[in-house]
């Protein structure tokens, strides 16, 4: 029975996307409530500062990965993210006994920014 519980914990833990944030300046910022999403750097309509890089990996659809990127960027104090990379990726298989999960997935990377001017 304990083995079944351990396997279920591994399966549940492996289901969601993994999110990583790397700060460029190490500053602590107040979390934000709204994060804009840009897919093209030329569409950012005001001055900004790059504060970090956010990466999401998982088997989830693109919409969910973008939502996770936005949530993580908001906790780090970003005003917006600029999607810089979205590509299929190989996620290593996890295996416990005969149970195997993982495989093909998607990785998305975005630059987290804060606006330095208030007007577009």
Image (cartoon, helix red, strand yellow):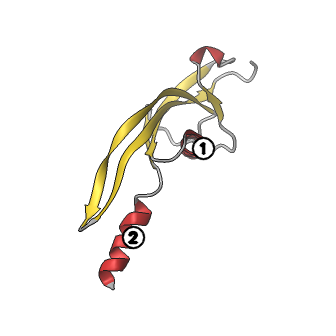
**Residue at point 59%, 46% (across, down):** 71
**Secondary structure under the numbered disc 2 in the rendered image:** helix
Q: Secondary structure at mark 1?
A: helix
**11 w.r.t. 1: above or below:** above
Q: Quadrant of the N terminus?
A: bottom left
First-in-chain label (2 vs 1): 2
Q: CA distance from mark 2 to mark 1?
A: 24 Å
Q: Residue furthest top?
A: 42
Quarter of the view holding residue 82:
top right
Other-residue count near label 1 (Cα within 10 Å), few / some / many at <14 / 14–19 / ≥20: some
User: What residue is drawn where x is 64% and y is 23%?
Assistant: 116
User: Residue at the location (68% across, 18% down)?
Assistant: 46
Q: Quadrant of the C terminus?
A: top right
Which residue corresponds to mark 1? Answer: 67
Query: Which residue has dot 2 on it?
Result: 9
What's the residue at 42%, 43% (across, down)?
A: 105
Q: Quadrant of residue 90?
A: top left
Q: Check the image and name the residue furthest to the left.
A: 97
């Amino acid at each position: 029975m304990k083995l079944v519980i351990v396997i279920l914990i591994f399966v549940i833990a492996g289901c969601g996307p993994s999110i990583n944030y790397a700060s460029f300046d190490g500053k602590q910022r107040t979390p934000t409530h709204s994060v804009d999403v840009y897919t093209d750097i030329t569409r950012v309509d005001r001055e900004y500062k790059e504060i970090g890089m956010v990466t999401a990996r998982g088997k989830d659809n693109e919409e969910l990965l973008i939502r996770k990127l936005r949530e993580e960027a908001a906790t780090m104090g970003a005003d917006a993210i600029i999607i810089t990379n979205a590509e299929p990726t190989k996620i290593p298989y996890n295996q416990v006994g005969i149970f195997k999960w993982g495989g093909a997935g998607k990785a998305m990377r975005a630059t987290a920014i804060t606006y330095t001017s208030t007007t577009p």
